[in-house]
């Protein structure tokens, strides 16, 4: 299968229902061949990625869209755990947040985030952002040797 | 830095004026002695030199100058008196130097025929005339150079001290220069007083300021200087007396002087250390309380920063939704997909409502503790009944069993705030009890010592221990599937703090949660 034809699978970690819905609808709009699973907090995100409990049959995501401020386990903590886990470290993580604090951005980059994007209030920008990062991280920048593609 | 103590300043000024009055009386006494030919008023005995009339005039001027300086400051009257003093001293001195008689020595009274140790009839000793000249100058320079003035007056004071010591030790004749008058005992005593009278008439100036500081340095100098002046005099005098009375030899006397010097320095050393230590203790106390205040301020500042940050973040979040869904809606309309457009409109409306809730919550939160409310006796049972009544619809909808302990103690506090706290806890409990099969809420309270504890217990899903503190923080929401702004429990915590208490939760996941509001039982002294 050609990589660009693959169905890109997103994991969206977002506590705000409306933001989640917005991102999912934007992905739909752009008809990026995709499927999206959404979890609402950091703890669930880790459970999902480790395929534990109710997520035993979860598909390994090609891109993770991660909110910064999350209940239970916050975004930076999730990021740290992902990047410290050899089997997950290669999945591109895009931090999606409303925080414009420089310290948050620096922390995220220190933890090897692949991209850090401040949620724009302007809708067109938002659309562009979601489409950009799905193309960039989902199509062009897929790690060559992720376990599922080689399987 | 100046730590001038106004009370001390006044006391020193009064001391100065007392010394000045003594000087004036003393001078008048000597003049009376001359006027009435009563020699006992002017000299110690026949063997000693008498205090000359002009010496009395000098002492009178010195007393007057200090009084005028205190009450009128650097004005003409003081300067005139000081000028006269300077003129008197210089003229008399000049007579001794160039051996001319201006006729000023016997201007007032003629000297007695039996005068001893007298260079020229009626003329005061050159030491005394020098002292008066210097003292006159010291007052004259005060407007421009207070410190110089004080040094000058101290010099004339030490001239008196020198002569006084001589009399005390019985060696005044040793210092007598042939052909000039020796200093009289009266002049010596008088000159002893002129320096403190001058220094402390206005002690806020120059070196004198050190004496009126209400801190350790002031305490030290107030004891040290009198001790430095009096102790050697006293000890020396006693040794001298012992030698004269032949209690012991002069060698032994010298040994005693050595001993008293050692003892005095040792004692002084310990005393100084004690003063400094006390000062240090005081400062440490201040520093500690300052540290506490600083830390409290830091905490408030961090809270404020957190507040601003979370407010902006939490308001921005629904704003992103509003603009996002409006954008989608426009697209939907263009595409003719009105069902989708309607859905987007619903989301916009909900997001706007969320913003409204957040703003209301922020207002309510910021109002905690700022409403002008008097502490009053609050019937908590009545309050709880009203709250339960208000949310009856919600309770009935989920068939929640609410049990109220009617023995709850009353409390003295701010009624509106307490009501909001209990209402927030109850609404919170309603929300989570509803998730249980047999939902149940218990509300109760009891008093421990000077505190009252009220609890609201639900049998909902409970809270894991690591979130027990977090739930009371601003904008922290554990369960985002439930409505809420993340301000309710933060308000409860703030209200508890306002009542000198705290709010906390006891819970195990799966076993419900008990929220406790602890407040001071007596609110009378809450607002201090």
Image (cartoon, coloured by chain):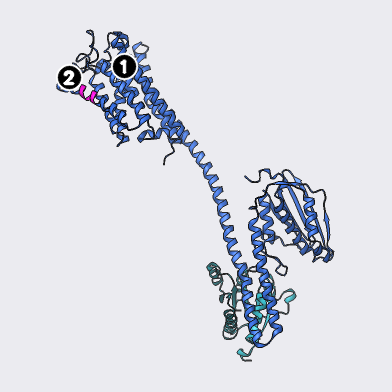
Chain colours: A cyan, B blue
Q: Is residue B58 visible?
A: yes
Mark 2, residue position: B102
> Is residue B222 on the magenta stretch?
no
Mark 1, residue position: B186
Position of residue A108 relative to residue B516, above or below, is below
Q: CA distance from mark 2 to mark 1?
A: 24 Å
Task: Please identify the quarter of the rendering in which residue B300 is found.
Answer: bottom right
Position of residue B28 relative to residue A98, above or below, is above
Q: Is residue B8 left or right of residue A120?
A: left
Residue depth check, mark 2 versus mark 1: number of the one nearer the observer: 2
Spot occupied by residue B502 in the image (x, y as percentages of width and height): 68, 52
Residue drawn where x is 51% and y is 42% of the image: B284
Task: Please identify the quarter of the rendering in which residue A96 is found.
Answer: bottom right
Position of residue B410 relative to residue B459, above or below, is above
Q: Is residue B211 left or right of residue B150?
A: right
Residue drawn where x is 78% and y is 54% of the image: B384
Q: Work out which residue is located at the far front of the displayed protein and give it.
A: B76
Q: Secondary structure at mark 2?
A: loop
Provide the chain ID for the residue under circle 1. B
| Contact between labelled residues 1 and 2, with CB atoms less than 8 Å apart | no
């Amino acid at each position: 299968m050609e990589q660009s034809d693959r169905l890109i699978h997103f994991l969206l970690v977002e506590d705000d229902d409306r933001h989640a819905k917005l991102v999912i609808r934007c992905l739909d709009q752009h008809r990026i061949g995709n499927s999206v699973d959404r979890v609402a907090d950091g703890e669930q995100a880790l459970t999902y990625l480790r395929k534990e409990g109710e997520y035993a049959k979860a598909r390994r995501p090609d891109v993770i869209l991660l909110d910064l401020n999350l209940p239970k386990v916050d975004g930076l903590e999730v990021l740290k755990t992902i990047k410290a886990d050899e089997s997950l470290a290669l999945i591109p993580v895009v931090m999606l947040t409303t925080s414009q604090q420089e310290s948050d951005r620096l922390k995220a980059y220190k933890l090897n985030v692949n991209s850090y994007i401040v949620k724009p209030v302007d809708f067109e920008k938002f659309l562009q952002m979601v489409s950009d990062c799905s193309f960039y991280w989902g199509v062009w920048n897929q790690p060559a040797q992720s376990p599922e593609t080689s399987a | 830095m100046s730590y001038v103590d106004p009370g001390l300043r006044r006391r020193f000024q009064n001391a100065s004026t007392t010394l000045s009055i003594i000087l004036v009386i003393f001078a008048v006494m000597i003049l009376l002695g001359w006027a009435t030919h009563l020699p006992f008023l002017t000299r110690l005995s026949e063997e000693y030199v008498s205090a000359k009339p002009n010496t009395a005039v000098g002492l009178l001027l010195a007393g007057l100058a200090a009084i005028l300086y205190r009450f009128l400051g650097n004005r003409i009257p003081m300067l005139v008196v000081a000028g006269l003093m300077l003129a008197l001293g210089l003229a008399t001195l000049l007579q001794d130097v160039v051996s001319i008689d201006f006729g000023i020595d016997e201007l007032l009274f003629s000297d007695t025929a039996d005068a001893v140790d007298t260079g020229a009839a009626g003329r005061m000793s050159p030491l005394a005339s020098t002292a008066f000249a210097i003292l006159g100058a010291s007052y004259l320079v005060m407007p421009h150079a207070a410190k110089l003035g004080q040094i000058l007056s101290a010099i004339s004071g030490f001239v008196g001290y020198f002569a006084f010591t001589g009399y005390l030790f019985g060696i005044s004749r040793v210092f007598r220069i042939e052909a000039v008058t020796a200093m009289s005992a009266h002049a010596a005593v008088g000159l002893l007083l002129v320096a403190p009278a001058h220094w402390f008439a206005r002690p806020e100036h120059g070196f004198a300021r050190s004496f009126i500081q209400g801190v350790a340095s002031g305490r030290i100098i107030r004891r040290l200087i009198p001790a430095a002046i009096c102790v050697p005099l006293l000890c020396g005098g006693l040794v001298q007396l012992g030698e004269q009375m032949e209690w012991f030899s002069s060698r032994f006397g010298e040994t005693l002087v050595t001993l008293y010097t050692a003892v005095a320095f040792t004692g002084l050393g310990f005393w100084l250390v004690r003063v400094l230590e006390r000062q240090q203790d005081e400062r440490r106390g201040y520093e500690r309380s300052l540290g506490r205040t600083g830390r409290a301020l830091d905490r408030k500042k961090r809270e404020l920063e957190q507040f601003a940050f979370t407010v902006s973040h939490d308001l921005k979040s629904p704003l992103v939704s509003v603009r996002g869904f409006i954008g989608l809606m426009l697209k939907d309309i263009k595409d003719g997909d009105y069902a989708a457009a309607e859905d987007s409109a619903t989301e916009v409306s909900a997001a706007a409502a969320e913003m409204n809730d957040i703003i209301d919550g922020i207002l309510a939160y910021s109002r905690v503790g700022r409403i002008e409310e008097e502490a009053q006796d609050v019937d908590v049972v009545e309050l709880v009944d009203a709250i339960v009544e208000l949310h009856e619809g919600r309770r009935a909808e989920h068939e929640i069993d609410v049990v109220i302990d009617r023995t709850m103690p009353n409390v003295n506090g701010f009624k509106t705030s307490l009501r909001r706290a209990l209402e927030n806890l109850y609404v919170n409990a309603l929300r989570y009890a509803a998730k249980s099969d047999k939902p149940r809420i218990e509300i109760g309270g009891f008093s421990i010592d000077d505190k009252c504890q009220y609890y609201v217990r639900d049998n909902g899903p409970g809270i894991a221990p690591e979130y027990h503190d977090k739930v009371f923080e601003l904008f922290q929401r554990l369960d985002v599937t439930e409505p809420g702004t993340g301000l309710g429990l933060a308000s409860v915590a703030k209200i508890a703090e306002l009542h000198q208490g705290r709010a906390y939760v006891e819970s195990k996941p799966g076993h419900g949660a008990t929220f406790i509001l602890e407040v001071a039982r007596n609110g009378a002294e809450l607002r201090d």
